Image (spheres, helix red, strand yellow):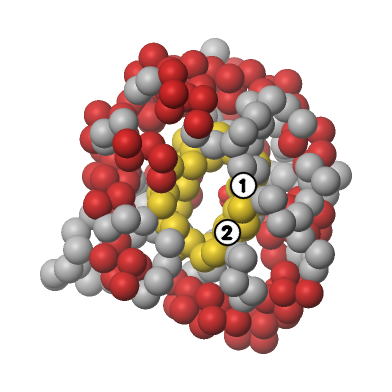
């Protein structure tokens, strides 16, 4: 964790299902006693980005869950990095496994999106991770490196100051099957090693690598003390009061 600021993101996915639920979640976060040394970012559906930003305490930032790689034009249903920037949205999640799997986004598309987001001065939470089959056949490091390599090729060294890498093993997302702290630490260390070689030792040292996949209030503390775990990306538990315990896990 060293000098890297601890980062906790909440990925609401296609939730909450009503404005009332959104209000309840906001009140919970606004009233909670949050560790002020942690960077907190929540990612609601795009429809709620602006209203949520307006009612959330100002220390909490918002993130989009996706964006396109063009700034405007005939791309029905898409939202551009320039539009997010104009709306005051500072972050975007890219490469989530649900986008890769359900919406067929390749690493090359995700690299184009990352490049476009950075060109609009957005920060990016870049998600990578292996499937269960890939882990069981010893391909975790290879898969993570390949997913990152596509992005490395599209970026400059300076661009990395605006990227947070979320290591999210696919088998741990929404399954209740969290990675052990040893598994998370080993993979995070491998990712950092890859960055050191593929980009630079300085970028490897400075880049936050956060863990995602069934993080909850019961398992967050043990994961948070691992030296290469710089925070969390939280799905299901970010919709619940325990999100506050996860934000405060290093306290
Ligand atoms: C996610 O979708 O980014 C995630 C980590 O989900 P969950 O915490 O529900 O496993």
Q: Which residue is mark 2?
A: 41
Q: Is mark 1 within 8 Å of ligand 1?
A: no
Asked if residue 139 shows in the view, the reply is no
Residue located at (19% from left, 59% from top): 70
* Residue behind mark 1: 7
Could you tell me which secondary element the residue under label 2 belongs to?
A: strand
Q: What's the mark number on residue 115? A: none
- Asked if marks 2 and 1 touch (Cβ < 8 Å), the reply is yes
Q: Residues within 10 Å of mark 1 (few under 14, many from 20)?
A: many
Question: Between disc 2 and disc 1, whose residue precedes?
Answer: 1
Please state which of residues 159 and 25 is positioned toward the viewer in this rendering.
159
Residue pictured at 49% horizontal, 16% vertical: 193
| Mark 2 and mark 1: Cα distance apart in space | 8 Å
Viewport quadrant of the N terminus = top right
Q: What residue lies at 22% left-to-right and 71% top-to-bottom?
A: 76
Residue 229 in picture, x, y percent from top left: 65, 32
Which percent across, then down, holds residue 55?
60, 82
Residue 126 in the image: state x and y as whole percent.
44, 43
Q: Residue furthest left?
A: 73
Q: Position of residue 148 (x, y in %)?
A: 38, 29
Q: Quadrant of residue 6?
A: top right
- Which residue is pictured at 32% across the width and 36% down the height? 158
């Amino acid at each position: 964790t060293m000098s890297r600021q601890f980062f906790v993101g909440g990925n609401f996915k296609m939730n909450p299902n009503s404005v009332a639920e959104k209000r309840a979640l906001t009140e919970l976060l606004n009233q909670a006693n949050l560790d002020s040394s942690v960077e907190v970012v929540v990612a609601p559906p795009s429809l709620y980005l602006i209203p949520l930003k307006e009612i959330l305490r100002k220390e909490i930032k918002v993130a989009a869950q996706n964006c396109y790689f063009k700034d405007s034009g005939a791309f029905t249903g898409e939202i551009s990095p320039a539009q997010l920037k104009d709306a005051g949205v500072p972050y975007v999640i890219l490469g989530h496994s649900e986008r890769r799997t359900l919406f067929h986004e390749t690493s090359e598309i995700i690299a184009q999106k990352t490049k476009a987001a950075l060109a609009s001065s957005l920060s990016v939470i870049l998600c990578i991770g292996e499937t269960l089959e890939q882990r069981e056949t010893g391909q975790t490091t290879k898969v993570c490196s390949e997913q990152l390599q596509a992005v490395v090729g599209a970026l400059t060294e300076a661009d990395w100051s605006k990227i947070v890498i979320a290591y999210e093993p696919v088998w741990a997302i929404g399954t209740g099957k969290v990675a052990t702290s040893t598994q998370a630490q080993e993979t995070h260390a491998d990712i950092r090693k890859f960055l050191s070689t593929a980009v630079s030792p300085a970028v490897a040292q400075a880049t936050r690598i956060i863990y995602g996949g069934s993080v909850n209030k019961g398992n967050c503390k043990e994961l948070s003390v691992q030296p290469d775990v710089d925070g969390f990306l939280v799905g299901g538990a970010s919709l619940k009061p325990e999100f506050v315990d996860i934000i405060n896990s290093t306290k």
